[in-house]
Image (cartoon, rainbow, N blue to C red):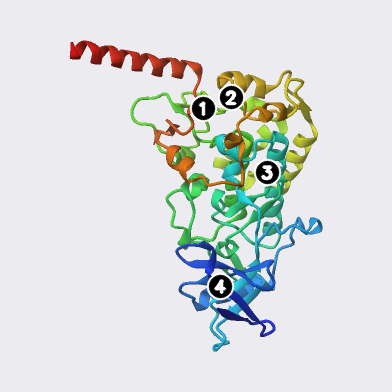
């Protein structure tokens, strides 16, 4: 199939069978030549979408990783029309992203151990810093992501970050003094003031993105723990995550009378560098009443860069990196808590691990995915994360099995 570029009339060829991605609104294909580009074709093109793309192409953000040759924001570069109709815009041309994975593969501890076992805490800090740099570049040009979440952020093995699905961002229409709005969002990344608000009815602000950015940084630095996930200690059913966000129930700094405490297996909040904790407090506690004081992306960049430079190496495991304000290695402590499961395994230990346990990009994952389906109940992962069970949970499970067999034995007799 061929489409025509509106900038120079050049024809681009791609195979409809080589789909790189597909969704409810569009499909993405790799271009035959140049192979570094891809096309996104909308199922139902509209005039408003075409105008939004024109505004984006006319005012691209500066890419913070351009000096290193990496594309960190997959921005539209040209409009595409059918060969026989040069006025109807059906999609756009953009850089093709290769060799990267969703950010959740890096902050989820089990997936990281399986795919990227040598991705240390230093690289998690660097990933967070690079993500903040991308958002800073977008805000500098007046853009707001709006729906910033784990599904539109890709990460590479060197901690490089790429934002995708950029045509869903909120875009300023400078000609008509308005915004092309972002009409979607995930509750777990939505700030308190926008919970239960219709996104199609409001113009998003940078501070709304800054809440989502802080959530993602928290997950990167706290082993995938959501900042508002916690253990309910009050009466009745635990409130859903979005309700905790709306009411400001940040369990790591609970207010008097709080009914939400940190999860027992979550990393301790004081593991984090002091400057990083200050920024989280400004966002999740003080920023609930005053969204404008949430830390800007540039402030996160500086704090995370300082945190990376202050890391110490553990004498027991060179992969354990931790903040210099701590007197001992928190990852060794966490390894003991998890019954010997190391969040950042050493190179030496990986030499003695079966290849099937550390394979990353090769081999089929279908069987593994079926066996490790996530079964959740009140935010507790029951089976998929069984490797992180404390010893007392295993002991309880064995005791229940023993009592069950005793019951069956005496019932049969």
Q: Earlier in the sequence, mark 4 or mark 2?
A: 4
Distance (Cα) linking label 1 and label 2 = 7 Å
Say whether residue 18 is left or right of residue 158.
Answer: left
Q: Which mark is residue 387?
A: 1
Q: Position of residue 235 (x, y in %)?
A: 35, 25
Real-space CA distance between mark 1 and mark 4, rounded to the nearest whole angstrom: 43 Å
Q: Secondary structure at mark 1?
A: helix
State the residue position of label 2: 341
Q: Earlier in the sequence, mark 1 or mark 3?
A: 3
Residue 112 visible in this rendered orientation of the protein? yes
State the residue at coordinates (69%, 44%).
Answer: 127
Helix or strand or loop: what does disc 3 sit on?
helix
Q: CA distance from mark 4 to mark 3?
A: 36 Å
343 up-or-down from 291: above or below: above
Which quarter of the image is occupied by the N terminus? Answer: bottom right
Disc 3 designates what residue? 128
Q: Earlier in the sequence, mark 1 or mark 2?
A: 2
Contact between labelled residues 2 and 1, with CB atoms less than 8 Å apart: yes
Dot 3 or dot 2: first in sequence order is: 3
Q: In the figure, residue 302 lies in which quadrant?
A: top right
Q: Which mark is residue 359?
A: none
**In this figure, which residue is indicated by the disc labeled 4?**
15
What is the residue that sits farthest to the bottom in this orientation? 84
């Amino acid at each position: 199939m061929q489409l025509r570029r509106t900038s120079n009339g050049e024809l681009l060829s791609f195979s409809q069978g080589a789909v790189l991605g597909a969704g409810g609104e569009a499909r993405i294909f790799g271009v035959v030549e140049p192979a570094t580009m891809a096309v996104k074709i909308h199922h139902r093109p509209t005039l408003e979408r075409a105008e939004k793309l024109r505004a984006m192409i006319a005012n691209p953000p500066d890419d913070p990783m351009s000096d290193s040759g990496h594309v960190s924001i997959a921005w539209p570069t040209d409009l595409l029309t059918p060969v026989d109709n040069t006025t109807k815009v059906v999609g756009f041309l953009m850089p093709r992203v290769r060799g990267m994975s969703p950010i959740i593969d890096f902050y989820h501890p089990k997936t990281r151990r399986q795919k990227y076992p040598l991705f240390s805490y230093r690289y998690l800090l660097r990933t967070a810093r690079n993500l903040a740099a991308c958002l800073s570049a977008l805000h500098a040009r007046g853009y707001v992501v709006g729906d910033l979440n784990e599904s539109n952020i890709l990460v590479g093995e060197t901690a490089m970050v790429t934002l995708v699905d950029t045509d869903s961002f909120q875009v300023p229409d400078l000609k008509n003094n308005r915004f092309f709005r972002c009409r979607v969002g995930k509750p777990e990344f939505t700030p308190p003031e926008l919970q239960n608000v219709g996104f199609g009815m409001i113009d998003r602000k940078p501070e709304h993105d800054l809440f989502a950015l802080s959530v993602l940084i928290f997950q990167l630095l706290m082993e995938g723990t959501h900042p508002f996930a916690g253990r309910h200690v009050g009466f009745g059913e635990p409130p859903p995550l979005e309700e905790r966000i709306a009411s400001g129930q940040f369990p790591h700094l609970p207010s008097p009378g709080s009914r939400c405490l940190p999860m027992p297996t979550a990393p301790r909040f004081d593991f984090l560098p002091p400057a990083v904790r200050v920024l989280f407090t400004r966002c999740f506690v003080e920023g609930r009443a005053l969204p404008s004081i949430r830390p800007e992306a540039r402030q996160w960049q500086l704090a995370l860069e300082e945190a990376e430079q202050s890391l110490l190496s553990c004498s027991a495991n060179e992969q354990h990196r931790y903040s210099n304000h701590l007197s001992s290695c928190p990852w060794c402590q966490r390894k003991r808590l998890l019954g010997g499961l190391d969040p950042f395994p050493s190179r030496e230990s990986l030499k003695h691990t079966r290849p099937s346990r550390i394979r990353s990009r090769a081999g089929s994952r279908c069987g593994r995915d079926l066996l490790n389906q996530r079964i959740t109940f009140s935010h507790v992962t029951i089976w998929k994360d069984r490797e992180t069970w404390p010893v007392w949970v295993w002991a309880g499970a064995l005791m229940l099995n023993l009592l069950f067999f005793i019951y069956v034995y005496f019932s049969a007799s």
